[in-house]
């Protein structure tokens, strides 16, 4: 975007003068000033993480860690510290505010190069420190000067793909605008690609977090689409076998041509397509814990498209037929109308010739009341794929690949939680069973017993309106390690979240709750064991504590503040109550709640939410998160949010 580049410096300077100011409509932040930092003048870079520091005659040369490649198109943030509150800092000629901690963050235009260079000069009390930061930037394809070109980084799809015999493969590529673009198959046939008009380019980080209006997006005229049917490229082999190593010299590769006048650009399309036999499909069973650790969530996530959001959760033992694959993503056939994509490493082949599960189920569906739950037992012909959908006061079980011939639906003794059972057969091979509840859904889980599916529905806890936390079991998850964000002066997210978690534990226990602290030391704990811990401890609610950070390329001065994430519908009210209370406590901008596919927000056994209290990468918010007062406010906000949620749930 040349126009943006031309005004970039002025824009950056203007943004920096408003750095750390609240946005329109935001309350005035309440800051808790620590003393001004008066250490030695010393330029430190927190992001991109430093790899090496080399003193030279011209000043310090800091080379970013080689594993960091900045993913941005035109602007990027860098942040760090100068060690002193009274320092004046200039980066690439732009004044950058220094916070009382010595921390700073800058939002700067990027050169059109694979190496970005930032010159930093810090001055304090007549003392001057100079540093040059060098960081790698993702290489974007630059069209060559020739009339025709093909962007070889833009082929989609690439790798190994298996489809049904009648299934077209959609192909997309970037090449010279106004070119004639075609695929040459090894058979001698050609497939013409047509231009995809008015394609709008939006970088992913910008799409998720950016606030630029749609009118400012870049329109692209260089995208071409087409479709091909049948196998092409070298044979990809067995759909369930490990992927073969590509052989670049194989004559069976498909080639692409982009022709402008008498100039032709040519490239090999790195894709091999195989065909699965629908009459003799391979059948798999699910096992997400091949190592036998017992610490996985024992569920395989299914997605509507490769690498898309989790939509199904198939317990270990589920059996399904395979009807496609793309690299490490396997496509399961659930019914005639439904497929789910899953990770290849979590499925295991059954012997060739094993028929797909399904058929008809007979027998009776029955409810079993227990003290803390009601269990629905569904007899099935096999461990077939299913899905549970929740509404505010109902759970719907969809069973794939079968018709039902149920003799009875037995309620058992009258139960205050159960209103009615519904049955439907919306398609020949999909069956639905719905349980209507007398109270909002609190939690559920599913498991196999033989080929019976058990849906365990949790009874809501009895809430004391005056002391809503009394007797509650609250799982508190201090986010990270592994990983975690870092602030300009080096404050680490795992330290902040543990400090907040401990304070929260004290407040919750004082309010009469039992706390299950999912991390209590610096030792890393993966995500799945945290969820397993909370479920085994039978927590009533799970709250995960984090500090936020942005992806490269998103302006941190207009995208920061407080937000809370949920995944299951019943957790939305929890997320809202937490977000309201945290915004009140912190006084920074309200980014609102969001639905996000996060492990700690996904449990089904209890309402769960993940708090992104503030942004650690902004110096003022880092100072709040690092302070005792700020951490107490974070903890108090969570307590207030939990109380509001629990009171509200008792009233619903
Ligand atoms: Zn985090």
Image (cartoon, rainbow, N blue to C red):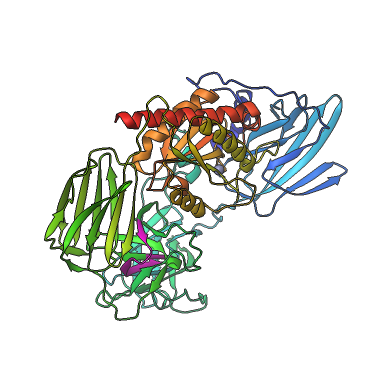
Q: Is residue 252 visible?
A: yes
Residue 5 locus on image (x, y percent): 58, 36
Question: Relative to residue 328, is residue 370 depicted above or below?
Answer: above
Magenta run includes residue 322 = yes
Magenta run includes residue 460 = no
Question: Relative to residue 147, is residue 352 depicted above or below?
Answer: below
User: Left or right of 105: which side holds 530?
Assistant: left
Q: Quarter containing ligand 1?
A: top right
User: Which residue occupies 33% across, 41% down?
Assistant: 442
Q: Is residue 149 visible?
A: no
Question: Relative to residue 567, is residue 90 depicted above or below?
Answer: above
Quarter of the C terminus within the rendering: top left
Residue 456 locus on image (x, y percent): 31, 52
The residue range painted magenta reads 313-330
User: Which residue occupies 29% across, 52% down?
Assistant: 388
Residue 294 locus on image (x, y percent): 48, 62
The quadrant holding residue 609 is top left
Instruction: Please state which of residues 114 and 554 is positioned toward the viewer in this rendering.
Output: 554
Magenta segment's dominant SS is strand
User: Left or right of 21: which side holds 216?
Assistant: left
The quadrant holding residue 608 is top left
Instruction: Please state which of residues 71 and 217 is positioned toward the viewer in this rendering.
Output: 71
Residue 547 locus on image (x, y percent): 57, 38
User: Left or right of 405: which side holds 371?
Assistant: right
Instruction: Please state which of residues 516 and 174 is positioned toward the viewer in this rendering.
Output: 516
């Amino acid at each position: 975007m040349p126009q943006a580049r031309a005004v970039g410096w002025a824009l950056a300077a203007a943004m920096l003068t408003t750095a750390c100011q609240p946005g329109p409509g935001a309350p005035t932040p309440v800051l808790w000033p620590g003393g001004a930092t008066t250490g030695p003048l010393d330029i430190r870079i927190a992001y991109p993480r430093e790899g090496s520091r080399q003193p030279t005659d011209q000043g310090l040369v800091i080379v970013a860690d080689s594993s960091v490649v900045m993913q941005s198109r035109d602007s990027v943030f860098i942040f760090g510290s100068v060690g002193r509150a009274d320092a004046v800092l200039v980066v690439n000629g732009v004044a950058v505010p220094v916070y009382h901690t010595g921390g700073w963050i800058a939002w700067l235009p990027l050169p059109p190069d694979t190496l970005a260079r930032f010159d930093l000069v810090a001055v304090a009390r007549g003392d001057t420190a100079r540093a040059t930061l060098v960081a790698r930037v993702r290489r974007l394809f630059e069209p060559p000067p020739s009339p025709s070109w093909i962007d070889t980084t833009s082929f989609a799809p690439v790798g190994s793909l298996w489809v049904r015999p009648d299934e077209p493969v959609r192909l997309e590529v970037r090449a010279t605008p106004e070119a004639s673009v075609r695929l040459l198959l090894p058979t001698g046939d050609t497939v013409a690609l047509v231009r995809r008009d008015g394609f709008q380019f939006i970088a992913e980080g910008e799409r998720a977090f950016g606030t630029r209006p749609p009118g400012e997006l870049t329109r692209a005229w260089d995208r071409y689409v087409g479709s091909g049917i049948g196998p092409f490229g070298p044979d990809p082999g067995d759909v369930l076998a490990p992927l073969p190593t590509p052989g670049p010299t194989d004559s069976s590769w498909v080639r692409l041509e982009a022709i402008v006048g008498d100039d032709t650009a040519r490239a090999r399309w790195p894709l091999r397509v195989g065909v699965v036999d629908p009459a003799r499909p391979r059948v798999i069973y699910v096992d997400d814990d091949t190592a036998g650790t017992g610490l996985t969530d024992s569920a395989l996530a299914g997605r509507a498209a490769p690498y898309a959001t989790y939509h199904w959760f198939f317990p270990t033992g589920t059996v399904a037929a395979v009807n496609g694959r793309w690299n490490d993503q396997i496509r399961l056939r659930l019914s005639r109308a439904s497929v789910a994509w899953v990770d290849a490493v979590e499925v295991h082949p059954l012997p060739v010739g094993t028929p797909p599960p399904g058929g008809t189920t007979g027998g009776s569906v029955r409810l079993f009341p227990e003290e803390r739950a009601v269990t629905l037992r569904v007899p099935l012909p096999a461990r077939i794929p299913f899905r549970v959908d929740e509404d505010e006061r109902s759970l719907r079980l969809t069973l794939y690949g079968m018709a039902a011939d149920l003799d009875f639906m037995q309620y058992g003794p009258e139960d205050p939680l159960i209103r009615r059972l519904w049955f439907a057969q919306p398609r020949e091979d999909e069956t639905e069973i719905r349980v209507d509840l007398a109270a909002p859904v609190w939690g559920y889980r599913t498991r196999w017993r033989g080929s019976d599916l058990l849906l365990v529905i949790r009874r809501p806890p009895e809430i004391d309106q005056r002391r809503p936390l009394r007797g509650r079991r609250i799982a508190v998850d201090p986010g990270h390690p592994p990983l975690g964000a870092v602030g300009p002066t080096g404050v680490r997210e795992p330290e902040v979240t543990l400090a907040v978690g401990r304070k929260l534990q004290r407040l919750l226990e004082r309010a009469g709750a039992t706390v299950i602290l999912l991390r209590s030391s610096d030792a890393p704990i993966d995500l799945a064991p945290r969820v397993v811990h909370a479920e085994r401890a039978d927590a009533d609610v799970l709250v995960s504590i984090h500090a936020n950070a942005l992806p490269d390329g998103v302006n941190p001065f207009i995208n920061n503040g407080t937000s809370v994430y949920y995944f299951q519908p019943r957790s939305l009210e929890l997320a809202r109550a937490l977000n309201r209370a945290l915004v009140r406590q912190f006084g920074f901008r309200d980014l609102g709640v969001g639905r996000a596919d996060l492990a700690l927000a996904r449990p089904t056994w209890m309402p769960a939410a993940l708090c992104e209290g503030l942004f650690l990468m902004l110096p003022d918010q880092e100072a709040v998160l690092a302070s005792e007062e700020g951490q107490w406010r974070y903890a108090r906000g969570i307590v207030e949010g939990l109380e509001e949620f629990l009171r509200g749930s008792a009233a619903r």
